[in-house]
Image (cartoon, rainbow, N blue to C red):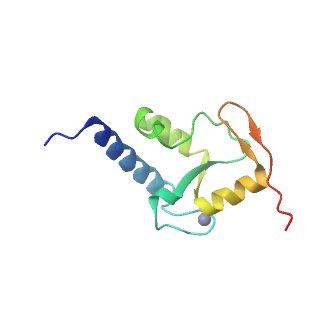
Amino acid sequence: MRKKHGEYLRDKRNRRKEELVKLKGGKCQRCGYSKSLSALGFHHKKGKVKKFNISGKNLSHKTWKELVEESEKCELLCSNCHAEVHDEEGWIHEDGKQTPKMIRTI
Ligand SMILES: [Zn+2]
């Protein structure tokens, strides 16, 4: 049976994400976590110019070349490590807005 377009795109995204994760070593570059693909993400290293987030629809809409180029500016991190990095560095969003650092006081 022919797959629905939405399903096709989801498969494509998953496949591409899996490939990119593999290219980056297949595990969190801080703690070595590798279990869930959903919990692994691409963190743009400080000082790198971010063109787009490597997630969601960008995984199906961008060309493979663009995705690989963008992933070269990134560290592969698990959700926990990713959150920690952003607590330390703050967030810089695609529209240039910034979320400040999170300072833990207790
Ligand atoms: Zn980690």
- The quarter of the rendered structure image containing the C terminus is bottom right
Q: Position of residue 85 (x, y in %)?
A: 71, 56
Most extreme residue toward the right is 105
Q: Position of residue 5 (x, y in %)?
A: 28, 35
Residue plotted at (82% across, 62% down): 104
Most extreme residue toward the left is 1
Q: How many marks can you see? A: 0
Between 106 and 67, the one nearer to me in the picture: 106
Residue plotted at (42% across, 38% down): 64
Residue plotted at (49% across, 42% down): 68
Of the four image quadrants, the one with ligand 1 is: bottom right
Residue 5, relative to residue 35: is it above or below? above
Most extreme residue toward the front is 106
- The quarter of the rendered structure image containing the N terminus is top left
Is 96 left or right of 25, judged from the image as shown? right
Q: Position of residue 38 (x, y in %)?
A: 47, 57
Residue 102 is drawn in which quadrant?
Answer: bottom right
Between 106 and 73, the one nearer to me in the picture: 106
Q: Position of residue 34 (x, y in %)?
A: 49, 66
Residue plotted at (41% across, 51% down): 19
